[in-house]
Image (cartoon, rainbow, N blue to C red):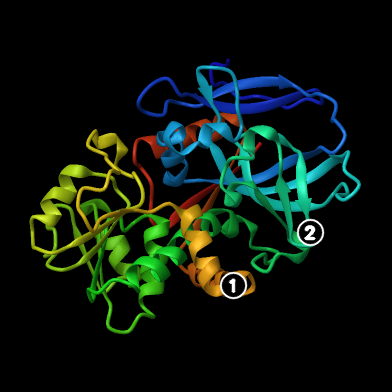
Amino acid sequence: MADGRGWTLDGAEIITLAVDRSGTLPGQLQRVTDERLSLRDGQVRLRIDRFSLSANNLTYALLGERMGYWALFPVGEPWGIVPVWGFATVTESADDRIAPDERLYGLWPMASEAVLEPGRVNARLIVENSPHRRALPPAYNSYFRLASDPIHVPGSEDRQAVLRPLFITSFLLDRGVAAAAESDTVIVTSASSKTALGLGWLLQNRPGKRSIGVTSPRNRDAVAALELFDAVTTYDDLPRSDGAMIIDFSGDRDMLGRLRGNGTGSQLCRVGMTHWRDGSEDLTPSGAHDQFFFAPDAIVKTVAELGPAGFDAALADATRAFIAASRPWLGIETVRGSEAIGEAWARLRFGSGDPTSAIVASF
């Protein structure tokens, strides 16, 4: 373990950042070092080039036990490795289907490198098949080969690392929840989060749907200036919720109680836990028509509706368009090294994020 002074990667050491998973809240990142072992037949080693850090990663840590996130990259107790989305390059291969220097997008440990054990491989995907990951949802075990990835646009990998893993949730919510809801009003909490902003952007193309973003007083003006919601209000001035579909990214039970009490007949879709630090977070559905959103399940359902090719095309088109639309307003902060990554994580833990800024990290 480390004291946070900053670290140098040498040729025999893997740097991994982990949190103490024994508490109820995710702690500060600590450094774990592992010796680099020789590959077994069929394995590949990758250098992790860059990954995004956001409130989404805090949600992974909070739901690590419940949703199986700690099983992705197991490490000795009491530590847990927080999964991160980003890009990596093959540096060594013991699988003749995969050559060194190939680049992949997918879910990685917060580490300097990773080892995969590919199972199914096709022109588009490499599917991880390590025994400890076989029971996990396919979305978490799928690695996209950039040479044939329909979403990948060279020169925009920082934005892709930030928005791609979040926007798929926006896309699925827009199709499966907002569009299907009988109400013409969609209330989105934690409206400053990138997933909520992506949903607001998509709802602009839903005729007859009125979107209301709810955020903190500190972020209200910044969110309103983006003009992605029809109206923006604050937790201190909650909107009427009569018959509305509420899409909640906060997990704040007390706030939701006040919001739902500000009208009748609302429906609730629980998605995230951005307000974990309030001590009132809860994802348990509380009403007969409430639902808990889990992206891997929604992917399976949407693929069944659109077909694999239709799903890929629709998601790729929408993702590329949103990434392009983000250029005028989304700034990217890059951090490098264990110390800087730890400082960025601390800012996320204590809620000092900015709706118009995002963090991309590397070792």
Q: Is residue 269 left or right of residue 87?
A: left
Please name the amino acid that badge 1 sits on: Gly
Return the x and y of residue 136 as percentages of the image width and height: 57, 42
Residue 166 location (% of width, % of height) = 48, 56
Query: Is there a contact, CB below 8 Å, between mark 2 and mark 1?
Result: no
Q: Of helix, strand and loop, which one carries label 2?
A: loop
| Quadrant where the C terminus is found in the figure | top right
Up-down: is 132 above or below 326?
above
Q: Work out whether residue 208 or residue 322 is closer to the camera in this orientation and state it.
A: 208
Q: Nearer the viewer, residue 102 or 291?
A: 291
Position of residue 11 relative to residue 50, above or below, is above
Q: Is residue 278 visible?
A: yes
Residue located farthest toward the bottom when viewing the structure as drawn = 207
Above or below, comparing residue 222 to residue 274 in the picture: below
> For the residue labelled by badge 1, is the local secondary structure a helix, a strand or a loop?
loop
| Inter-mark Cα distance, 2 to 1 | 18 Å
Residue position for label 2: 122
Q: Neighbour class for label 1 at 10 Å: few (<14), some, many (≥20)?
A: few
| Neighbour tally class for label 2: few under 14, some 14-19, many 20 plus, Cα within 10 Å | few
* Residue placed most toward the observer, 220 or 207: 207
Tag shown at residue 321: none
| Residue at 31% from the left image edge and 63% from the top image edge | 223
Which residue is the site of mark 1?
307
Residue at x 34%, y 44% (from the top left corner): 273
Residue 206 located left or right of residue 38: left
Mark 2 and mark 1 lie on one chain; the one further toward the N terminus is: 2
Q: Position of residue 269 (x, y in %)?
A: 30, 57
Q: Is residue 293 left or right of residue 101?
A: left
